[in-house]
Amino acid sequence: MVPMVLPSDTAQFTRRALILALSSLAMPARSEPLTVNYPSNSFVHDPQLEYVTDLLRLALRYSGKNFQVKPQPVEMAQQRTFMEIARGETSLDLMWTMTNPQRETSAMIPVRIPVDRGLLGWRLLLIRQADADRWRHVASIADMQSLVLGQGHDWPDTEILRANGLRVGTSSDYNSLFRMLLRGRIDGFPRSILEIGAELKAHADDGLMVAPDLLLYYPAPSYFFVSPKRPELAEQIRQGLESSIADGSMQKLFKRYFGHLWAEFQLDERRVLRLKNPDLSPLTPLQRPELWLQPNESGARKGVS
């Protein structure tokens, strides 16, 4: 048989095509990013939003996979958002929120590592400036039992305060709690140290201040809760958080966002009143001290180490 001879231009084209095909086999395929959708609520400010989304990206980098973390606008209350993710009725893949036994026994997958190192349970009290001397004499939980503290009627903190024998005045409206304080219907309004700075600025002309020398503390972990449709994502986040704690990168990120609070509110000089939190799951990792910040244990400035 006489061999077929290709024209020179056709042969060159064939050789180039063969080279391109072989080189494409040698190169790893560029994978499309795996999207992780989280809720971004437009009418409720989350003081941890930037920190927690950076923490999520940090945790996912340890997986070695290409993740894209994307906000999705929501106009729902937190509990409804939680329920819709649990039922798989939304494109959201996860959210972060304060835990309780009901949430941990839902269909959602809790990643039981406190995203804020327990900082949500560090509470300062907004009070009227005229009452500063009265609050200076509060040195124990018993001293507070004659005072009325304000909280939202469905906030988890309301039941925590009551479980510790404290009197609580409630409202279904956040802004009305400030009016209740100004009008003397409540004596103090416990607020997270993540929130109180902005609230003081918003009410700068109302004669409010932070109660001197006082800090309330109770364990109040916030977790990532992942959709039951994404169990592999929950495990990747868990492993990534564990790795970031082991190499110190989570602690560095936390300090970058929140380290200023220690000087701003003199946290290491405050009297710490420790409250019990009866609404914790038995699976809460209280036995792992590396996951938690403890206020003023030794008087040393180690809060952001």
Image (cartoon, helix red, strand yellow):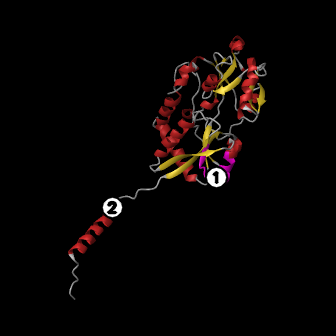
Where is residue 291? Give x, y as percent: 56, 35
Where is residue 234? Give x, y as percent: 57, 48
- The span shown in magenta is 81-95
Instruction: Residue 92: say if magenta.
Output: yes
Q: Is residue 233 above or below residue 189?
A: below
Examine the rendering and report whether any part of residue 106 can be seen.
Answer: no
Determine the residue positioned at 62% across, 40% down. Answer: 42
Would you identify the image quadrant in which residue 163 lies?
A: top right
Would you identify the image quadrant in which residue 270 lies?
A: top right
Q: Which residue corresponds to mark 1?
A: 90
Q: Secondary structure at mark 2?
A: helix
Query: Which sits in the foreground, 22 or 293?
Result: 22
Split into 4 quadrants, where in the image is the N terminus? bottom left
Q: Is residue 185 above or below residue 85?
A: above
Instruction: Residue 191: say if magenta.
Output: no
The tag on residue 26 is 2
Horizontally, residue 275 falls left or right of residue 59, namely right
Q: Residues within 10 Å of mark 1 (few under 14, many from 20)?
A: few
For the residues bearing labels 1 and 2, Cβ distance under 8 angstroms: no
Determine the residue positioned at 23% across, 73% down. Answer: 9
Q: Residues within 10 Å of mark 2 (few under 14, many from 20)?
A: few
Q: Is residue 133 above or below residue 219?
A: above
Where is residue 289? Give x, y as percent: 56, 32
Residue type, numbered disc 1: Thr
